[in-house]
Image (tube, helix red, strand yellow):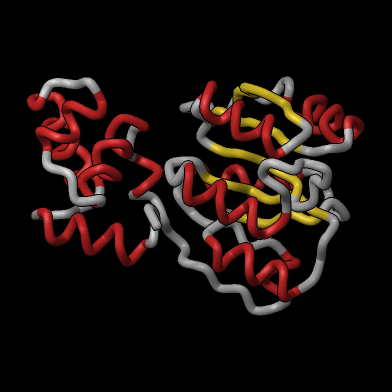
Amino acid sequence: MTRLRLVFADDHPLVLAGLHEFFMHDISVEIMAMVSSSTELIAAIAAHHPDVVVTDFSMPGDERYGDGLSFISYLLRRFPQVRVLVVTMVSSPVVIQSLYKAGVSGVVLKTEDMDKLGRALDAIRTGRVYVGEAAASIGVEPDTEQPFLTQLSPRELEVVRHFIAGQSLTDISLVLNRSIKTVSSQKRSAMRKLNAKNDQELIAYCVQAGVFQ
């Protein structure tokens, strides 16, 4: 079984300690970093390239990136290859609905048993969105499968992002300091994973998903 690479983010040290204690012996996951602010989380994702970020909804005091829905939305746009699982005390139906609409892969309330977090990660591992009791009770019905984007490597995502922005393969190779052959190969690989048969389908998929807006 492939281990999920995780980064945990919460501004309460005791919560982070509890998460570490719960997962430290779980052979299905690998803890890459544990951080306590939005800025630290951005840096940890850039450094470790995790599969999943498990983050609190409210982490006040970060003047650079803030917190809440605006930060979660930014996180999803900047790192579309990373799945985001929100763990929060906020049980507002409006907030929970907004998080799923933004594209998170699950919401777990801090009042729930810790094993619900494990269930959420199991769902994410198989390319599904986790809908727990809190979300189901308010009628959240996200797509059950979102495997495609998460299958792209960071390098493939870079190539697709620049291509969607209108750059030619030559331009992309110069910007990324890669050969045209490498860039072309990474673009073809991304298209196979996204089931895009041509450039038009690739552009349509990314525009519809809103992944690079």
Locate residue 136, reporting x and y percent: 67, 72
> What residue sits 49% from the left and 54% below the top?
128
Looking at this view, name the residue that lies furthest to the front.
Answer: 63
- Asked if residue 208 is positioned above or below residue 9 in the image, the reply reads below
Locate residue 93, reporting x and y percent: 74, 74
Q: Residue 142 versus residue 65: which sits nearer the camera?
A: 65
Locate residue 193, reporting x and y percent: 24, 44
Count of marks, rendered view: 0
Q: Which image quarter is the C terminus in?
A: bottom left
Quarter of image, res 104:
bottom right
- Asked if residue 63 is positioned above or below residue 212 in the image, the reply reads above
Quarter of image, res 117:
top right
Looking at this view, name the residue that lies furthest to the bottom.
Answer: 139
Q: Residue 158 versus residue 66: which sits nearer the camera?
A: 66
- On screen, residue 143 versus residue 98, left or right, reads left
Looking at this view, name the residue that lies furthest to the right.
Answer: 14
> What residue sits 8% from the left and 25% below the top?
181
Locate residue 1, reporting x and y percent: 47, 27
> What residue sits 82% from the left and 61% below the top?
90
- On screen, residue 17 versus residue 210, left or right, reads right
Quarter of image, res 5:
top right
> What residue sits 14% from the left and 24% below the top?
182
- On screen, residue 151 versus residue 22, left or right, reads left
